[in-house]
Amino acid sequence: MIDWKEIIGIVAGCCTTIAFLPQVIKTWRTKSARDLSLSMFLIFFTGVLLWLIYGIVVADLPVILANSATLFLAGILLFFKVIYK
């Protein structure tokens, strides 16, 4: 059974992950990633990957779900940054 702490974690994860969607959509539509900082996204991607590993190690479902989705979206933005030079 999911308790209130996990619900808060899942909602928080959804909010922070969904916040990336407008940037992914805008970058995809405009085919421009000029204003995105490559170094910031590399550091962010690494941090999210480490959070995902941490979540797996401690078996924390909200951390695993949120960071899996965020890692996917950040990966898309990194991909766009490389191909939309």
Image (cartoon, rainbow, N blue to C red):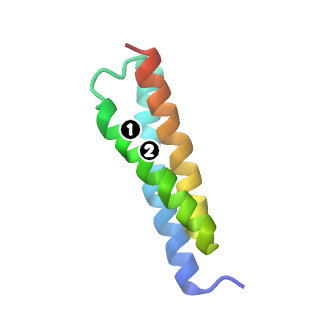
Rendering quarter of residue 2 = bottom right
Residue pictured at 42% horizontal, 52% vertical = 47
Task: Depth check: give the residue in front, 18 or 69.
Answer: 69
Q: Report the front residue among 21 and 77.
A: 77
Residue 70 at x, y percent in the picture: 51, 49
Q: x, y percentage for residue 61?
A: 63, 70
Q: Name the residue under label 1.
A: 42
Q: Name the residue located 56 percent from the left edge and 42 percent from the top edge.
A: 72
Q: Is mark 1 on a helix, strand or loop?
A: helix
Q: State the image coordinates of residue 71 (x, y, percent, origin top left).
A: 52, 46
Q: Nearer the viewer, residue 32 or 29?
A: 32
* Disc 1 to disc 2: CB gap under 8 Å: yes
| Distance Cα–Cα, label 1 vs label 2 | 5 Å
Query: Which x, y percent locates residue 60?
Result: 60, 73
Which image quadrant for residue 10?
Answer: bottom right
Three-letter code, disc 2: Phe
Q: Name the residue under label 2.
A: 45
Residue 41 falls left or right of residue 69:
left
Q: Residue at point 27% right, 26% down?
A: 35
